[in-house]
Amino acid sequence: MIQYEEIFEVEGESEEEFSAEETILAISFITMLADGKVNKEKNEAFNNIISNLGFYDNYSVNEFNEMLAKINRIYNNNEGPVFC
């Protein structure tokens, strides 16, 4: 379980709220990072899963990238578990 401590055992807590779409994206994102390694195959799988869900069809590329940037910022700043 040590490999997951970095993700789940954080000091802070994010005050930001997520929309349903952001929540799904955050769970997918954190799943991709679960073993601490990101590679080309995982990135492609992440993109395929997100694309096939259809939740983001009405979002522009810019809107989608803003959601992903928000989740990435929270993760990188240790503001709490990403999907709290």
Image (spheres, rainbow, N blue to C red):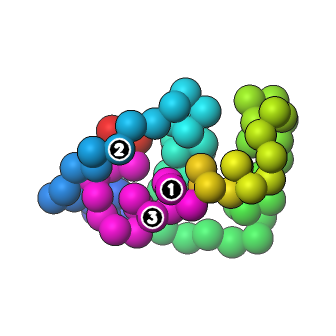
Q: Is residue 70 magenta?
A: yes
Task: Say if mark 3 contacts mark 1, CB within 8 Å.
Answer: yes
Q: Position of residue 3 (x, y in %)?
A: 36, 63
| Secondary structure beneath label 1 | helix
Task: From the image, tell me which residue sits under label 1.
Answer: 70
Determine crowd level at label 1: few under 14, some 14-19, many 20+ residues with C-alpha closer than 10 A.
Answer: some
State yes or no: residue 19 in magenta: no
What residue lies at 29% left-to-right and 58% top-to-bottom? 79
Image quadrant containing the C terminus:
top left
Marks 2 and 3, how far apart at CA: 11 Å
Instruction: Kindly report the distance in space between the C-alpha atoms of the residues bearing marks 3 and 1.
Output: 5 Å
Q: Residue at horizontal 74%, vertical 29%? A: 55
Depth check, front residue: 46 or 16: 16
Q: Is residue 49 among what the camera can see?
A: no
* Tags 1 and 2 touching, CB below 8 Å: yes
State the residue at coordinates (41%, 61%). Answer: 75
- The residue pinned by badge 2 equals 16
Q: Name which of mark 1 and mark 2 comes first in the sequence.
A: 2
- The amino acid beneath tag 1 is Lys
Disc 1 to disc 2, C-alpha distance: 9 Å
Image location (x, y in percent) of residue 20: 55, 27
Q: Nearer the viewer, residue 19 or 50?
A: 19
Establish if 75 lies above or below 18: below
Report whether residue 13 is seen: yes
The residue indicated by pointer 3 is 73
**Left or right: 49 with respect to 11?**
right
If you read the primary sequence from the N terminus, does the residue marked by circle 2 or circle 3 appear first?
2
Please state the total of marks drawn on the protein image.
Answer: 3
- Give the residue type at disc 2: Glu
Seen from the viewer's position, the closer of residues 35 and 44 is 44
Residue visible at 62% across and 55% down? Answer: 66
